[in-house]
Image: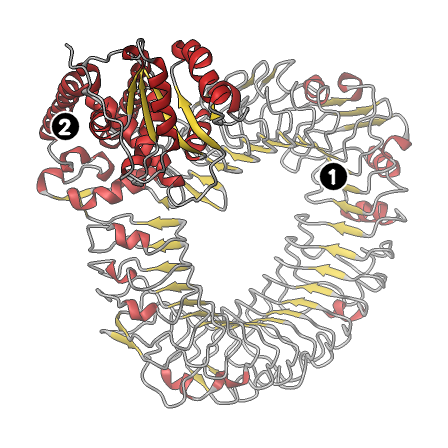
Amino acid sequence: LGPVEQWSGLFCKLNMFFLLMFMIYFPVPVSGFSLQSCTVSINTAVCVKKRLTAIPKDVPPTVTGFDLSVNRLTRIQQSDFPPLPLLLFMDLNRNKISEIDPGAFRTLTSLRRLNLNNNKVIKLGERVFDGLNNLTVLRINYNQIKVLSSTSFQSLTKLEVLDISHNKLQKSADLELILHHMPQLQELVLRGNSLKAFNSWEITNRSLALHILDLTLNPLKDFKVTSDIFQNLTRLKLGNPKGNEQTIWDVKNHTFLSRVSNLDISGLIMTLDDMKSLLEAVTSSLTSLRMNSMKLNHSQLINMSCSLPTMFILQFQFNKLKNKIDSYFFKSCVHLTELDLANNYIEHIPENAFMTLKDLKVLILSNNKLSSVPNATRTLQNLIELDLSSNNIGSVTCMDFSNNVKLKELALKNNSIQTLSDCVFKNLLQLQVLRLQSNQLIQLNKAFEKNLPNLKRLYLNGNKLKKISAKEFAGLRSLQNLTLHQNQIKDLVEDSFVGLTNLTDINLQTNCLTMKALKTGAFNALINLRSLDLTSNHIKFEPLSHPPFSNLSRLERLFFMGQHLNGNQHLSINSLQGLNNLLYFNARKNHLTNLDNDTFTYTPKLEYLDIGSNDLKTLSSQLFAPIKNLKNLYIHRTALHSLDFFIEANLTKLEFLEGRHNQYSVITEKVIKSLPSLLFVDFTYISFSCDCDNVWFINWTRANKQTQVNDAYNYSCNYPDNFKGKKLLDFDITSCLPDKGFIHFASTTGVILFFLVISFTYHFMRSHLYYAYHLIWAWLFDSRYKNKQASHRYDAFISYNSNDEPWVIEQLLPRLEGEQGWRLCLHHRDFEPGRSIIDNITDAIYSSRKTICVISQRYLRSEWCSREVQTASFRLFDEQEDVLILIFLEDIPTYMLSPYHRMRKLLKKQTYLNWSRAADQPDVFWENLRKALQTGNKPDGEKLLLTVIETQ
């Protein structure tokens, strides 16, 4: 490249520099991870209860779920949804949507489930679901849909579940518009519409893939099937408990419903003959039958249904049986394994009412008026599950369950039982679940001291227990879950939980426990405990010689919120001693004013910590030193004035930070950068200072792609006074930048001066610059060969311009090679093909004893010739070797030599010959050239000096 090209490259670099400067001072807006109206949780955009009237546009394109329920959306338009290529689920439940434009969901091509329940849609227009080719579940119940268009469901070819219940569809012909485009539909729910007839010929003549059809709560007058369209139907729901219309049953062939195994005819009104026909249609396949709120004779219905040989499960709720059950009521139900008689106002059941139910395994008698456990249940020796919840049972006796030896689940919750006896459960050796919550129990009376060896879950919450006596649960060696919350327990003793070596979860919240109860060492027996809830008690921690949890080495979750204490509290240093595997600790709302730096020394695996709603005011970074695995931290309402403790806390794994309702007003860069794994942060209700101290936080909130800043667009300013009530993200950060006017003036002035200097320098000194350019080039290449001792392959390298080539070939070459026998190096003859010109020139000069420069005016104007002479001159001046011979083919004016200072130095102290003056004595010229070639390379050798002609 020549000088002009070099300067051109420099100008390109300068242009790039100023472009970068422009980008720094005028940054391009970047979409951040703080959403205006939503949060992202488990890859789902949650925008619930935000009073939205338009669909947010700033939802990340990577979300798989989008929850817009409970808002004020009224219309869905084509442009509403941004491209969300990974979205699988969308919830638009409980809005006010009355209109959906064609193709409104077209950008949601991956959507699998869509919920449009509880809106105000009246009509599903043409192509309303276009683009939803992958949708499998559509729920659009509780709208006002009256009209369906022929292409409404055209794109839903993969739909498997459609729930369009509680609308205003009136004609069975509407179903044809639904089913025509849905070859894979398996579940169709049409309950609560206005369908008066179901005529199969109006729907389709082909076999459907339907497995479930729900037509309940429709005023059906006719149910007519004329062809075998339900070959895959297994569950059919008919009937209208709230209606008075009689339904005509007309199924032409009993085999049309021969695969239905689950039938619900609750509230269905029809003649007894039609009822028989209905049951005959499913006689070979029916296994489960629901007949709730029936208006026909109950005994006849039971006899007809129980005569079906394959029917094992019967639900007979809301039939107001009260005292209608007699000894013969279930005499035909010999095959039943499950019987549900809940919600029937039953007050009494005869002792032999269930005598024929030898195979019964599940009996549900909840929500009735029973005052005691019916003696009839004692005959059910194969019973596995018995539910007597929500009755008026005041006590249980030792005989009530004595024969139910196979019982695995017993529910007595929500009764009025006050006491238990030690024999009441003695024969229930296989019982695994016992529900006694919400009774009036005052004491347990050793009911669990020796019995129930296989019980795994025991629910005693919501009673009036005041004390857990010694060995109260000693017989429950298999128990895993024990709920004792919402009692009045105040006292524990050392052996209260002896025997519960397999217990993993115990709930003791909302009792009256104090530190005195914990001092007893009652928890020491719970060696396998994983979760302990002591919320809402009266426990005041104080230094103890024997910490209450020292034996709970496997505990993972400890809930200690909301102790009902007055005044400031302090969590003692050894409160958590022994909890080496604790992962979760919640100490919210305890009036704590201080946490010792060694508080968490004993919990090195802690991942979740909630110390919110306390009066801490300050936290030390050393507090978090032992819990480097912390992932979730709640410090809301702690009156903190600063978050600087994070800087040295080394919480590199923290992902979730909830710091709302505090006193700090500035979030610094150091704080945020000390939490490199942070994914979610909540600073809601912080009184932010809207000044330059928060500029970094504002920029970070807008631009970061990793951490979601919850509800950041609603963060408000509290300082200074003129910004009060304004939004933090509306603060003009440009006011905090240096004075742009001065910067622009200074930079512009500097650029102008820079270009002026360059222009003047180039104008007045371009020749010197040109020379300096070649000088530098020669020095660079000379340095590569300076220390090499390569052997000389040539006597001389001939440097000449191509225009002088005839003189070299016709005069120089014959004399020096032909007559005198010198070996010369020539461009066209000896340069190595394929190698760069620069490398060839350099190698040629350093491989030759001498360099002969054939100088003419054209030679001095040649870039390559200039490089050759400069490289050779470096060997002369820098290596102190006499290697250069100059031959002038013509007289050279001084002004052409002036830019080449080394050239002038060469003429003053180096051998040179003038061909233009040798016309009279050419032999002398060639002899002098021979002598110059014969001389050595030492600088003090013989010189042949001539005078340069000074011409202008």
Residue at the spot 22% in from the left edge and 74% down from the top edge: 567
Q: Secondary structure at mark 2?
A: helix
Mark 1 crowd level (few <14, some 14–19, many ≥20, 10 Å Cα): many
Q: Position of residue 370 (x, y in %)?
A: 64, 64
The answer to which quarter of the image holds residue 24 is: top left
Please name the residue shown 55% across and 34% down the image.
Answer: 86
Q: Report which residue position mark 2 lands on.
A: 747
Q: Is residue 36 visible?
A: no
The location of residue 721, given as percent across then percent down, is 9, 42
Residue drawn at the location 46% of the way across and 28% of the way down: 840
Q: How many marks?
A: 2
Label drawn at residue 265: 1
Count residues near mark 2 (Cα–Cα under 10 Å), then give few for <14, some for 14-19, many for 20+.
few
Q: Is residue 628 left or right of residue 100?
A: left
Between residues 940 and 237, which one lies in front from this camera angle?
Answer: 940
- Report the coloring of the rendering: secondary structure
The circle on residue 428 is none
- Secondary structure type for disc 1: loop
Residue type for callout 1: Ile
The quarter of the image holding the N terminus is top left
Establish if 588 lies above or below 183.
Answer: below
Q: Is residue 698 left or right of residue 130?
A: left
Indicate left or right for 129 with 232 as reference. left
